[in-house]
Image (tube, rainbow, N blue to C red):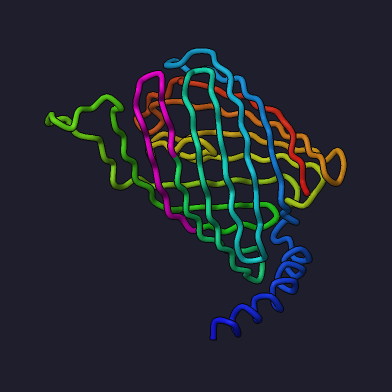
Amino acid sequence: MKKLLCACCIVLCPFVFSWAAANPGFGNRRYSLTVMGEYSYNTAWLHHGNLDIQALMPFNHYFEMETKLQFSSANVYTGALQLRPKFEVPVGEMFLETDIMYRALARNRIGDITAALAVGYRMDYVSVTLGVFGRVMDDWDRSMHTNDSYVVEPFNLLYRLEVFCRPQNNPWNLSFMVSNTDDYQMERMWQPLFMVGAWYDVTDHWRLDFGAQCKPTGMFHLNATFYGATFRTGFTYRF
């Protein structure tokens, strides 16, 4: 039986990979590597710079994965993993999303891990995601022999709405997004982030990326004040 299974895998694998290459998925999504530099400011960490590295891996028409790393001069380091099964619908596609993110706040000696489950829909001009996430925060110096404990937030709402000016497979585009999560943070549901993004395809393989983010505080308490802003630029190489 094992020999039969191995023989089937050997025979079918070339067909599976050739099919996946011929069906890159929604919006002509391809294997890609993105590197971006950021200037950021907020009232807690003041001025700082970030280096972002991201990889998109659309294994086939029904499943893709993203990995993300951020190194910050504020002495904060973040890693994230997204798993995304996809299902075609008459217009666009539905997807399920599992997010796991770990942020090491070395400056404060605190670890912050978040995990989310969400369902989403995307088409040429709109992408919508809704889900839940939980958070665990722990002090690196917490002694196991004291009554101190880690902090758990078992339930938070996750939401994301992004609107595009042009279909997502165009060589240039502009988008506007409101969400309580981005590539490297998941905020509480009453803490929305406002983002603008753009890209321009220089060649079939090279893409220029631009983005900006504004993070106010107190939005849901009718007393919104500025907390921070981020500006980013970089490039994507698509295989």
Asked whether 130 or 148 is in front, the reply is 148
Question: Which quadrant, please, contains the N terminus?
Answer: bottom right
Residue in view at x 50 percent, y 37 percent: 79
Give, as a single range, the part of the protein colored magenta.
Answer: 102-119
Q: Percent from the top left, x then y, of residue 233?
A: 70, 28
Q: Percent from the top left, x then y, of residue 151?
A: 25, 35
Q: How many marks?
A: 0
Q: Percent from the top left, x then y, of residue 28?
A: 75, 56
Q: Is residue 201 magenta?
A: no
Q: Is residue 109 magenta?
A: yes
Q: Is residue 78 left or right of residue 231?
A: left
Among all residues in the image, which is located at the extreme front?
3
Location of residue 142 by image quarter: top left
Relative to 205, does residue 3 appear above or below in the rendering? below
Q: Main secondary structure of the magenta part?
A: strand
Residue in view at x 44 percent, y 15 percent: 43
